[in-house]
Amino acid sequence: MARRNKIYEGKAKILYEGPEPGTIVQYFKDDATAFNAEKKATIEGKGVLNNRLSEFFMTGLNNIGVPTHFIKRLNMREQLVRQVEIIPLEVIVRNYAAGSMSKRLGIEEGTQLPRPIVEYCYKDDALGDPLVTEEHIAAFGWASQQDMDDILSLALRVNDFMSGVMMAVGIKLVDFKIEIGRVYDGDFQRLIVADEISPDSCRLWDIETGQKLDKDVFRRDLGSLTDAYTEVAKRLGVMPKNNAPVSKPTLIN
Ligand code: UDP
């Protein structure tokens, strides 16, 4: 078997050169990290779930005309995506206060915000992904004004789509993070949603009970992360019911 060309290994994913120029194979690992990789664990089945869930969300976005990097799922842990130039920003959209915003502004977690609030963090692990303003982004040339208009519009469209999809299965979309990539089509360039959309990068709370169904389960030691992600997948119909993603292979007669 030919050895594949690894392009990059991150905390939760590995990127390999794809079969065609301009494509990448994105492999979802079982590794979980939090607090800028100070807390680490391997959680069996997480990669399989996130591969499926990201496929589900990205396909839905593609279908309503929000462009994403997703091309197709290849197997349990891998998907084929378009190669992009990643804009070095984490784009965060918040519908309810939580996490770093609650700490920073002293707003109780779960407080509904008057409208969705979009924040930008500069992607730099060594600096702990600091919050930046559009002034920094423009001054340091991380994105142009046109890019920022497009990024805001993509972020709000993703928020509307994700909020609706989650609401329909009894889950509140508290906040999420996306990354944006630049692609070139001939003389034109455009921005598309890249990286992943999964419970690793969203806050998802059960509407009735407030139960957390996202990576905070790992960050705050609230129980089984696989159980939480499986619950999200089941409600969305992504995983066949009663078919745990981590089940061992069984012989079929
Ligand atoms: N988030 C992420 N990656 C990061 C930082 C944040 O996916 O490196 C997501 C996080 O899961 C949450 C949202 O972005 O859904 C807002 O995160 P926040 O700024 O509150 O940071 P945290 O409290 O997670 O440090």
Image (tube, rainbow, N blue to C red):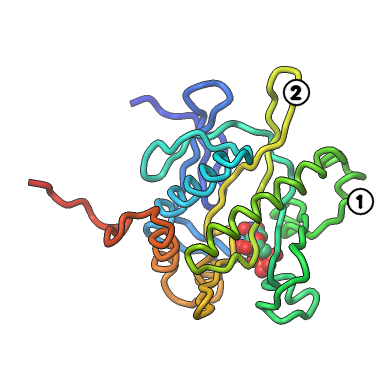
| Front of the two marks 1 and 2 | 2
Give the secondary structure at mark 1.
helix
Residue 64: x %, y % from top left: 59, 42
Residue 26: x %, y % from top left: 50, 39
**Mark 2 surroundings within 10 Å by alpha-carbon count, few (fewer than 14), some (14 through 19), many (20 or more):** few
- Foreground of the two, 180 or 136: 180
**Which residue lies under the disc numbered 2?**
188
The residue furthest left is 253
The residue sitting at 82% across, 43% down in the picture is: 149
The residue furthest top is 186
The residue sitting at 63% across, 37% down in the picture is: 67
The amino acid at mark 2 is: Phe
Left or right: 20 as drawn, with respect to 84: left
Q: Do the residues labelled 1 and 2 touch (CB within 8 Å)?
A: no
**Mark 1 surroundings within 10 Å by alpha-carbon count, few (fewer than 14), some (14 through 19), many (20 or more):** few
Left or right: 36 as drawn, with respect to 238: right
Residue 110: x %, y % from top left: 66, 77
The amino acid at mark 1 is: Glu
**Which residue lies under the disc numbered 1?**
135
Q: Distance between the residues labelled 1 and 2?
A: 26 Å
